[in-house]
Amino acid sequence: MSEIEIKVLHPKKDIVKFIKFAWKIYKGDPNWVPPLMMDKKKLLNKDKNPFFATAEMEMFMAYKDGEPVGRIAAIKNDTHNEVHNENIGFFGFFESINDQEVANALLNAAKEWLKSKGLDAMRGPANPSSNDEFGMLLEGFDDPPRLLMTYNPKYYLDLMNNFGIKKIKDLYAYRIENKELLKSEKLIRVADIAKRRSKVEIKQINLKKFKSELEKVKFVYNQAWAPNWGFIPMTDAEIDNLAKELKPLVEDSLVLFAEVDGKTVAFALVMLDYNELFIDFNGKLFPFNVIKLFTQRKKITWARILTLGIIPEYQKRGIDALLYYEITKRAEKLGIMKGEASWILEDNEMMKRGAEQVMNGKVYKKYRVYQMDI
């Protein structure tokens, strides 16, 4: 039996090796979307990603007979533990051949590193946090992931179960179809009531005033999601960094604010599903794919609702319905007839009711977050 060797990777020199290993796992998989190398390098760069101002990460790679057979990262996220009064660590960026011994060695390496940091439990996958790609695909393997959602081989579920790590939470993705949503009498009625009673105005982002518009996003973001399980508030630097990355891809008619008496009370960020283009880029944007990114965007048929949040005192007034209605009508003008609302916690009954009863959405993918004591 071949021995499995786990090596700690250099945080700078080995980043490309760490990222490129995924190509070995997904070779020939028609539903895998290769990540853009430049984006992943920025994400993992401790000097460029402001996430690492309050977090630590160690990267590991498994070798068998001298060949790389798996990778994993262990993450200590101080902000998470401070906000949730927990003492847990995370694993992320997990990839492995279909070999239980390899998976066990990787997960044990992450577990031992987290334990050495004085942490009591390991949760994941988080790549590297719940504000990034989060969870392991549980259902919906017959379809490529939407933008910034995870994808993995089905056998990963067996690797996790056999290792002994257990489910702590499932996340849902809803498929929304314009024609079904606009059949919803409840949506139209509630949206109309919100508009009249609360005198809500919907405004799209003004990209010419991007800096001041971003301040409105910050105002809503950390208030709207604070009560949610696993939520980690983003610092101004993190929001600025994310906005810088997404700005070139933003369709301004799908980035909306709701205002009441001139006060911003809600924010919705909907992105075209650029994964429909990225799937053919093989991880490279330059020199030619960057042209395709903008010349072929009209071919995109899906959008993803990444974020829709309302500050607490304005929730349960139907503002969400009004935003969903506006998003749908605007998407239709762009030729986008399908959307994904994701991710939604399995026990977030208010959001689930909105997706199912107001938007006529259907759960079409599920993701699992695992945890174990260490």
Image (cartoon, rainbow, N blue to C red):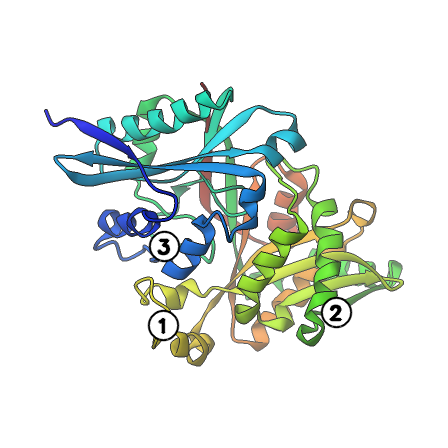
Quadrant position of residue 41 = bottom left
Secondary structure under the numbered disc 2 in the rendered image: strand
Instruction: Report the residue that reaches farthest toward the bottom.
Output: 295
Identify the disc placed on residue 286: 1
Instruction: Report the residue that reaches farthest toward the left.
Output: 1
**What distance separates the C-alpha of mark 3 from that of mark 1?**
26 Å
Identify the disc placed on residue 203: 2
The reply, left or right, for residue 200 in relation to residue 373 is right
**Label 1 amino acid?**
Phe
Nearest to the eye among marks 1 and 2: give it: 1
Nearest to the eye among marks 3 and 1: give it: 1
Q: Note whether 223 is above or below 113 in the view shown.
A: below
Q: Are marks 2 and 3 in contact (CB under 8 Å)?
A: no
**Label 3 amino acid?**
Asp
**What distance separates the C-alpha of mark 2 from that of mark 3?**
33 Å
Looking at the picture, tell me which residue is in the foreground, 227 or 360.
227
The reply, left or right, for residue 243 in relation to residue 139 is right
The reply, left or right, for residue 43 in relation to residue 264 is left
Looking at the picture, tell me which residue is in the foreground, 23 or 251.
23
Identify the disc placed on residue 143: 3
Sooner in the amino-acid sequence: mark 1 or mark 2: 2
Within-10-Å neighbours for mark 1: few <14, some 14–19, many 20+: few
**Label 2 amino acid?**
Lys
Looking at the picture, tell me which residue is in the foreground, 235 or 24.
235
